[in-house]
Amino acid sequence: GESEIQTLIREVREETGIDELDIHSYIGKINYSYFRGDGMKSEKEVTFFFATTPTREVKISEEHADFRWVTLGDALSMLDHAKLKLILTKGHRKGLY
């Protein structure tokens, strides 16, 4: 299987078209449950890294309708999920962004 870093690189490429990625550090993981469209409960684990890219051009995949670059404050105000806010805040406290 893929390592977490290999998965990060592949997912970023598939979802944004960005190939040039500088991975700086691991931030953390969150686990959560959700109900799929068919009503079945599913478990998910998401791993977060701090990474940068000199690329400003993004080519989003078909699974996304839009994107935008945002500040940390804007990102925090856009998120509803407390665990995601915690991950962003944790990375910011570490001085990553």
Image (cartoon, helix red, strand yellow):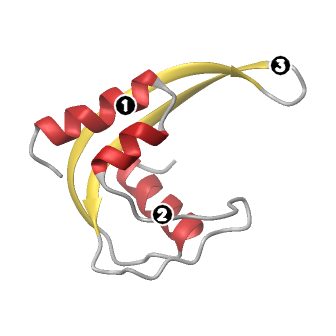
In front of the other: label 2 or label 1?
1
Quadrant of residue 38 within the rendered picture: top right
Question: What secondary structure is marked by label 2?
Answer: helix
Q: Please tell me which residue is depicted at 83% across the width and 19% down the height of the picture.
A: 40
Asked whether 6 or 45 is in front, the reply is 45
Q: Please tell me which residue is depicted at 38% across the width and 80% down the height of the picture.
A: 56
Question: What secondary structure is marked by label 1?
Answer: helix
- Say whether disc 2 or disc 1 marks the residue closer to the N-terminus: 2
Question: What secondary structure is marked by label 3?
Answer: loop
Amino acid under disc 2: Val
Mark-to-mark CA distance, 2 and 3 = 28 Å
Q: Are marks 2 and 1 in contact (CB under 8 Å)?
A: no
Image x and y of residue 59, in percent: 57, 78
Name of the residue lying farthest toward the left: 95
- Say whether disc 1 or disc 3 marks the residue closer to the N-terminus: 3
Residue at the spot of label 3: 40
Relative to 88, is 45 on the left or the right?
right
In the image, is residue 69 above or below residue 27? below
Residue at the spot of label 2: 12
In the image, is residue 40 above or below residue 87? above
- Say whether disc 2 or disc 3 marks the residue closer to the N-terminus: 2
Mark-to-mark CA distance, 1 and 3 = 26 Å
Residue at the spot of label 1: 85
Amino acid under disc 3: Met
Amino acid under disc 1: Lys
Dot 3 crowding, Cα within 10 Å, few <14, some 14–19, many 20+: few
In the image, is residue 40 above or below residue 63? above
Name of the residue lying farthest toward the right: 38
Image x and y of residue 53, in percent: 29, 72
Dot 1 crowding, Cα within 10 Å, few <14, some 14–19, many 20+: some
